[in-house]
Image (tube, rainbow, N blue to C red):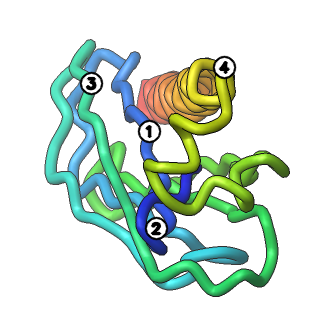
């Protein structure tokens, strides 16, 4: 999660680690900063990844969000996986690109943290999709 020019951006990657397509994939912020914002991604084939970005106006309230990825692993079944993302404490101070260049080294640390958040979201979503399909496979056989 980052703040740029008064907007909060939540970015991540969804991954399908199952052996079937995940239909109707939708990433929505259900609680916290940017609650109610979301993006529809469509279908993910097995081993496919898609990046997403959700944004909202910076309100100054709160510093975390509950991000939920909804997907349909089988006809008539809806599953989801959750991840909590946080705005780093230093990020609230870095509202404009000019302040990033004034504070030497901060931009690099924020980039590393964003990469870590994206990796965590991708892993959680991928694992949840894979487990859901494994359960549906064992129930269906």
Specify whether 91 is left or right of 12: right
Residue positioned most to the front: 102
Q: Earlier in the sequence, mark 3 or mark 1?
A: 1
Q: Earlier in the sequence, mark 2 or mark 4?
A: 2
Q: Visible in this render: residue 84?
A: no
Q: Residue sitting at 32 percent across and 64 percent down? A: 76
Q: Position of residue 5 (x, y in %)?
A: 42, 67
How far separated are the C-alphas under marks 4 and 1? 23 Å
Q: Is residue 116 above or below residue 135?
A: above
Would you identify the image quadrant in which residue 95 lies? bottom right
Q: Residue sitting at 47 percent across and 82 percent down? A: 57
- Which mark, residue 28? 2
Q: How many marks?
A: 4
- Which mark, residue 49? 3
Q: Earlier in the sequence, mark 4 or mark 1?
A: 1
Near mark 2 (Cα within 10 A), the count class, few <14, some 14-19 or many ≥20, is: many
**Which residue, given by chain and number where applicable, does mark 4 sit on?**
105
Q: Residue sitting at 75 percent across and 51 percent down? A: 86
Q: Secondary structure at mark 4?
A: loop
Quadrant for the C terminus, please: top left
């Amino acid at each position: 999660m980052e703040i740029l020019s008064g907007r909060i951006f939540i970015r991540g990657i969804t991954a399908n680690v199952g052996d079937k397509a995940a239909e109707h994939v939708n990433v929505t912020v259900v609680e916290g900063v940017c609650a109610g914002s979301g993006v529809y991604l469509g279908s993910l084939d097995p081993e496919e990844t898609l990046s997403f970005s959700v944004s909202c106006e910076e309100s100054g309230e709160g510093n975390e969000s509950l991000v939920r990825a909804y997907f349909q692993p089988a006809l008539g079944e809806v599953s989801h996986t959750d991840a909590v993302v946080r705005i780093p404490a230093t990020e609230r101070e870095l509202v404009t690109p000019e302040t990033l260049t004034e504070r030497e080294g901060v931009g690099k640390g924020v980039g590393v943290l964003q990469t870590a958040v994206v990796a965590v979201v991708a892993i959680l979503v991928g694992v949840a999709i894979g487990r859901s399909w494994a359960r549906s496979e064992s129930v269906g056989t």
